[in-house]
Structure formats: structure tokens, C-alpha cells
Image (cartoon, rainbow, N blue to C red):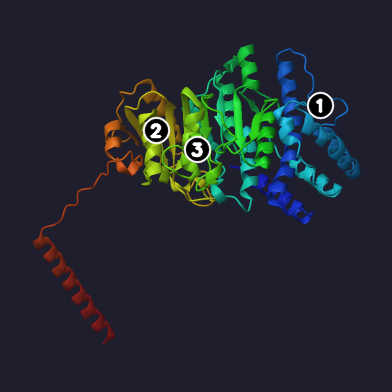
Amino acid sequence: MLNPEIKSTIDKLWNNFWSGGISNPLTVIEQISYLLFIKGLDDKDNVNEKKANRMGMSYTSIFPEEIMKWSQFRHLEVEKMFDVVSQKVFPFIKNMGGEKSSFTAEMKDAVFMIPKPSLLQESVRLIDGINMDDADTKGDLYEYLLSKLSISGVNGQFRTPRHIIRMMVELMDPSAEDKICDPACGTSGFLVGSLECILEKYTRPESVFTDEKGNFYNRIGDMMTIEEWEHFKTEMFYGFDFDPSMVRIASMNLMLHGIDNPNVRQMDSLSKRYEEENKYTLVLANPPFKGSIDEGDINPTLAKGAKTTKTELLFIKLINRILDLGGRCAVIVPDGVLFGSTKAHKEVREALVEESALEGVISMPSGVFKPYAGVSTAVILFTKGGETNKVWFYDMESDGYSLDDKRNKLDNDGDIPDIIEKWRAVKKDNTLEPTKEDKWFWVDKKEIESNDYDLSINKYKEIEYEEVVYEEPEVILDKIEALEKSILEDIAELRRMVK
């Protein structure tokens, strides 16, 4: 979570843009994102130079000589800075992917809309004080920015907390061979989380270092081969979102993490235009809840079977379609998907159990998405193809933060470390059985079938009742008699005191 100082800085930035004449919240976020991206490019350039020097390699800056870096133009006087950023730096970032890149294609409609030099200068000054070396800070910063949207939460567009993203990524354990997709990517939180996990996984312990500022670098990726690096940079990460602003922010986010030509496209993944299938080995997603799509625009492959326009159900069908055989998925769904009684709800759950290997259901407490929503959710884990034999259920009671609107960090990480540890254990040996203290348990496929494919944890969770020992009637009567005697004595004492 962001510290109070950074939140205060973002609040000042936000107020400055509004008082400066930009009243559309999404426009404010985009303009701030462009500045964060420009600063991030400078930071990335400096880090890459340090890595190259550490490995004894030559390094060429990503900035041409004629383009000033953030660390250079921030010292300019106000009018000169405005001219440099608006006329040179901004056009440079729009086209830095090259004419044929998807990044340039998605950035073609980006417009520099900061209206006056003084607003730019003050924005640069405020952003310059934010240390974005920590990747979690970048993600939380975007999350905080997006929380200011007046439309936040409408159509289920909630930002996924960083620690929940990290948990889901670690459960899926991505590798350098994977092809990873988020069909409702937002700012690309799941893709960046996967990217960071892979780099950590393929970094030699001796390559980890701390620089002179105390920044920790453990995402070097020096165990990957040349072929794996090529795949990593060009063919590993794919994202789709219907909102062009989110696509631009997602593309910039991935570029700041070393993906020179992000495969992020503006696309309604549920529509007729999106035709991909059997392509990805891993899908991580938090699709929109409570949304609906025009029935006439739903892709025919998703319209088969029971009719529905509910996005949370259509996305489950979509994920199964775009996964390759043997592909894995971790997806967040509202609890209604687990127990809904409509024909479409039952059909989706039956397909998960009968046509895929449904492996796990993690029930999350309703406060995880506060303050934006109090909806109860779960994480579904499955593999396309294969066979469901039994399903691993985990009852998460805490995610390491308070479950009220403040979402304050607790003294521990809640159940998440245990979830990851126990999941890895049962993946190695699915004959393991829970102890009395464990928060997980198995449910056989036959039991799920007999319950209309209900996947809600309360359907199967054993409730322990404490035995209540009632006293004998004679003992109770004696206690009542003693209490009456005590009351009468107190009344008599009060009367004596009054006299």
C-alpha cells in the first residue's frame, strides 16, 4: 500500500490538474501516467546502464541525443521545459516502438493536454519526489490513481490489489516457456506480476545486489537463454481491454518493465471481433463483475448453450476458449458464479468440472475489494482438458489487511503465505490430507455433481458445534433462590440507610 507521503503527493497533483482546467478524471489519470512513464523511462535507462556496467557490457541509452531525459529537462526554466516536453519528449514516447509496433498503434490517439507551463513544472516537481524504484509502489500508485475515478466500481471495473495478484501468480508458477494472457487487463497488473515472478525465478542468487541507494535488485533474469529472452520480450505477454486509456497505460507499464513492443490491444474480448482460441498456456484475470454486453455483439462461440449476457459467466467461457489444451488459469469470480441457480450458471460450472480439471477454489473475504466494493469473491484454479477427481477448497479469512474501507496493513500477511505453501504441497502430492488446524479440505467430484455443481465453500465446509452443557433444574432453582435472597437483602440495607 502507498505510504501517506506519496498519497499526499498524488492528491496535490490531482487538485492541481483540476484547478488547471482538466476536469475529466480519466484525462487527469492519462496525463499523470504520461509523466510517470517519462520519468520511469529515465529510471529504467539508469538501471540498465548499471546492470551493463556490472556485467562489463557496453550500453546504449534508449534516449537519442536530441531528446532530453527527465533528469535533464526538470532543471529547465518553465517555458523551455513546456516546449521541450510537449514538442519533443511527448512525440518521442508516442513513437518509440517504431512504425509497425502495437505500442505506437495504441498511442496514436494520445494527446498532450497539460494546458500551461506552470502546471507542467509543478507536476514535474511533485513526481520527481516519488521514488518508483520499487515495483510494488508503481502498481499501488496506479491503483490509487484509478481509485479516484468517479466511475470506479461501475460495471465491476475494480483494481486488483497487488498482493492478490502476486498470490495468484505464485500459485500458477509461470515459466519462461509460457504464453500469458489477461483478456481484461486494465493497467496490466497480472502481466507485470507474472513478468516479475519469472525474472526472480530465473535470477542466479549471486546476481542479486543492492545499489548505493539501498534499492534491491533481484529481477535480473540471467539464467534465461537467448531464445527465452527473445520469447520473453516479444511473444510471452498479451493483454486486451475495451478502454483505450487503459490500453495506453498498460502498454506504458509493460514498457517500463522491459517489454519493448507490448502485445496489448484495444478489444472487447467478448465481442465478435475477438476470435483467438487455443493459444495461451496461462491466463490470469479479474474480469468485470456485474457487467453485461449487448446480446447481438456476443461472440457466437460464447453464445452457445444457455443464454446469458453476464460478463462474469461469458469470461469463464472465453478463457476456456483461448487456453491451449493443458493451459492453466487463475481467475477471480464473484461468489454468485459459484452457486447461481440459473441455467447459465450451472452450465458454466458443469463445464469447469466435466470438461476441464478443476483444481482449486479459494474463498476470499468480502473486504478484499474495499473501499470500491464489498462483493464476496473467489479464485478459481483450473487446467483446460484433463479430468477433475477432487477439488481443493481453501477458506481465506484474512489477506493481511483490515477488511474495512481503510484497508490498513496488519502485522502479518494473513492466510496468503499458507495458501501458497499448502497449494504447492498438494500439487506435489495430492494424497495429502488436512489437519484439524488447516483451513483447506478436499471435495470429491461426485459430491460436487450431486450438489448441482455448486462450488460455494459453505456447501462443503464442516461446521463445528460446541457442546453446551446444561445444568440440572435443581441447581438452576437454587441459583435463582440465592439471587432473590441477595436482592431482598440489598433492598433492606437501602431502607436502613434512608432512615
Amino acid identity at mark 2: Leu
Q: Which residue is mark 1?
A: 63
Kindly report the distance in space between the C-alpha atoms of the residues bearing marks 1 and 3.
40 Å
In percent of width and height, residue 294 lies at: 55, 46
Circle 2 packing at 10 Å, graded few (<14), some (14-19), many (20+), is many
| Left or right placement of residue 412 versus residue 95 in this view | left
Amino acid identity at mark 1: Phe
Q: Which residue is mark 3?
A: 315
Amino acid identity at mark 3: Phe
Is residue 21 visible from the viewing direction of this image? yes
Q: Which mark is residue 352?
A: 2
Q: Is residue 95 above or below residue 235?
A: below
Furthest residue to the left? Answer: 474
In percent of width and height, residue 491 lies at: 23, 79
Q: Which residue shows up at 68% across the image and 33% down it?
A: 251
Q: State yes or no: discs 2 and 1 in contact (Cβ < 8 Å).
A: no
Kindly report the distance in space between the C-alpha atoms of the residues bearing marks 2 and 1.
49 Å
